[in-house]
Image (spheres, grey):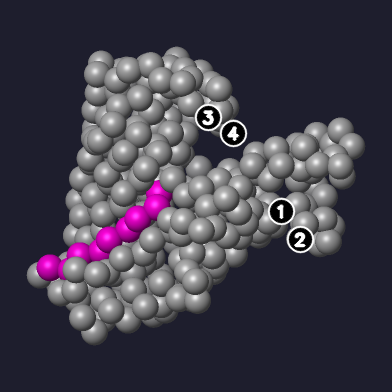
Amino acid sequence: MRQYLELCKTILEKGTKKEDRTGTGTISYFGYQMRFDLNAGFPLLTTKRVHLKSIIHELLWFISGDTNIKYLVDNDVKIWNDWPYAIYQKSADYHGESMDEFVLKIKEDAVFAAKWGNLGPVYGKQWRDFSGVDQLSELIEQIKTNPTSRRLIISAWNVPLIKEMALPPCHCFIQFYVNDNRLSCQLYQRSADVFLGVPFNIASYALFTMMIAQVCGLKLGDFVHTLGDAHIYLNHLEQINKQIKREPRALPKMLINPNVKSIFDFKYEDFELVGYDPHKSIKGKVAV
């Protein structure tokens, strides 16, 4: 995962300080690309421990078309909690509940979860119902029947619905490519939180590509990650500098249950990571 460390160094050396929507401030660099050979190992960061459970559950959540955090909360995945909690805090229903109390209500109260756990028409909605089109189903069909197509695309950027989303899609445009019976994927990410978000995004879309390759009977190619505004938040500089000093370790291997033949049939138990030996985790606060 030296590609990730090179990204960090490029931003620190060539980026510029820039104000942002959250008020945190960033060092920003525009236009960067990384390429990962999916046959060389599963691209999960080794210079800090990354929470794979969250990545897998979030991906399954996207694939299902769900947009409510209850599924994630029920599986102890916290990565989306901050946005609905921030919305809830501004409402008349808010009575000083802590984040933990809010999450407990999501878990135990279905009515509360339906009202306050919904993120609007975010990723899963667009993947499975983009103005009535199930993009994911159509993608799989096209890969199987027309693999040379240059239109193997999923878009999460649905302009009329952006204002209804708790967070407009950061990883917003995905293109797949079949050559020599190998499946590759390129993701365009308009906004990239390099410390917290990008390690998740790399692993998530690498895994997504592996899953699609399996159900389409294809071998693995590359995952190409193209970043628009690649930024390090100013409150993550210490964490990034700590990572840069760490030596990357051998990549792990991802084993997927070979009996799963539909993209919609995967379960958390169908994935096994082997040989993951990362450095210790590094904490950082998400900017909302």
Please report contact status of discs 1 and 2: CB closer than 8 Å, yes or no: yes
CB contact under 8 Å: marks 2 and 4 = no
**Real-space CA distance between mark 3 and mark 1, rounded to the nearest whole angstrom:** 23 Å
Q: Residues within 10 Å of mark 4 (few under 14, many from 20)?
A: few
Residue nearest the observer in this picture, 213 or 259: 213
Closer to the observer: label 3 or label 4? 3
Secondary element at tag 2: helix
Q: Amino acid at mark 3?
A: Arg
Which region shows up in magenta? Answer: 171-179
Q: Which mark is residue 114?
A: 2
* Quadrant position of residue 149: bottom left
* Residue 21, numbered label: 3
Q: Which residue occupies 53% across, 21% down? A: 24
Find numbered disc 1 in the image and state the secondary structure of the residue it sits on. Answer: loop
State which quarter of the image contains the N terminus: top left
Return the mark for residue 288: 4
Spatial CA distance of label 1 from label 4 is 16 Å
Q: Position of residue 240 (x, y in %)?
A: 39, 21
Dot 2, crowdedness within 10 Å: few (<14), some or many (≥20)? Answer: few
Query: Identity of the amino acid at label 4?
Result: Val
Outermost residue toward the bottom in this view: 145
Amino acid at dot 2: Ala
| 279, above or below 44, in the image | above
- Return the residue found at the far front: 160
166 is within the stretch colored magenta: no
In the rendered structure, which amino acid carries the disc numbered 1?
Answer: Gly
Residue under label 1, please give it. Answer: 117
Mark 4 or mark 1, which is nearer the start of the sequence?
Answer: 1
Distance (Cα) linking label 2 and label 3: 27 Å
Are the two marked residues, 3 and 1, in contact with CB atoms closer than 8 angstroms? no
